[in-house]
Every structure is written in structure tokens, then in C-alpha cells.
Amino acid sequence: MRSPKTGIAAAGLIIIGGLSLSGCATEDYVNKQVAVVSQRVDALEARVGQVDQTAQAANQAAQAAGAAAQQANQRIDQLSARVDGIEQRLASKRPRN
């Protein structure tokens, strides 16, 4: 006569074995899932490339604008000195009457 514990243990092993076999993924399933993820990664890489190009173009435009602003400031400084000189000469002259 078999003990009830032996029957329960055998049933448990059969259930665990069945679950473990059904839990294994087939190669086809894995390939399909990897293909989906790979497509998403490729799309993201393409988008990152576009964003990088846009960022580089914006950086170049900002640098050019900065250089132009610096040149404009230098020109303003030069003109300010000339205007100050003219104002001083006009202030030192006597008014005509």
C-alpha cells in the first residue's frame, strides 16, 4: 500500500514538470519578440540621429549669432567713443550769437 504522501509528491512532480515544459518559449516566439524590439531600437536610433543633427545645427547657428553679437558690440564701443569725442568738442565751443 502506497502512502498518501507518495501520491501527492508524484502529482506535484507531474504538475511542476508540465508547467516547466509549457513555460519554455519556442525559438520562433523568441525570434518574433526580438524582431519587434529590434525594430523599435532601430527606429529610436534613427530618431536620435535626427535630433542630434538638429541640435548640432542649432549649436552652429547659436555660435554664429554669438560671434555676430560680439562684432556688433565692438562696433558700438568704437562708435560710442567717437560720439563722446564729438560731444566734448561741441560742448567746448562757444555758441554763435
Image (cartoon, helix red, strand yellow):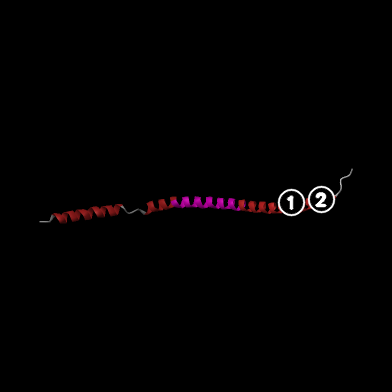
Mark 1 surroundings within 10 Å by alpha-carbon count, few (fewer than 14), some (14 through 19), many (20 or more): few
Secondary structure beneath label 1: helix
Query: Is the stretch drawn in magenta largely helix, strand or loop?
Result: helix
- Residue position for label 1: 76
55 within the magenta span: yes
Report how far apart the C-alphas of labels 1 and 2 lie in the structure.
15 Å
* Quarter of the figure with the C terminus: top right
- Give the amino acid at mark 1: Ile
70 within the magenta span: no
Residues 81 and 32: in front is 81
Q: Position of residue 51 (x, y in %)?
A: 56, 50
Task: Judge from the rendering whether residue 18 lies leftward or rightward of residue 61; answer left or right.
Answer: left
Residues 10 and 96: in front is 96
* Quarter of the figure with the N terminus: bottom left
Which region of the structure is painted magenta? 37-57
Residue found at the very far top of the displayed protein: 97
Task: Judge from the rendering whether residue 79 lies leftward or rightward of residue 51; answer left or right.
Answer: right
- Residue position for label 2: 86
Task: Judge from the rendering whether residue 43 lies leftward or rightward of residue 96; answer left or right.
Answer: left
Residue found at the very far left of the displayed protein: 1
Q: Which of marks 1 and 2 is nearer the N terminus?
A: 1
Q: Position of residue 92 (x, y in %)?
A: 84, 50
- Give the amino acid at mark 2: Ile
Q: For the point 81% across and 50% down, which residue is it?
A: 86
Q: Nearer the viewer, mark 1 or mark 2?
A: 2
Residues 76 and 3: in front is 76
Q: Where is residue 59 in the image (x, y as percent from the top left)?
A: 61, 53
Residues 18 and 68: in front is 68
Secondary structure beneath label 2: helix
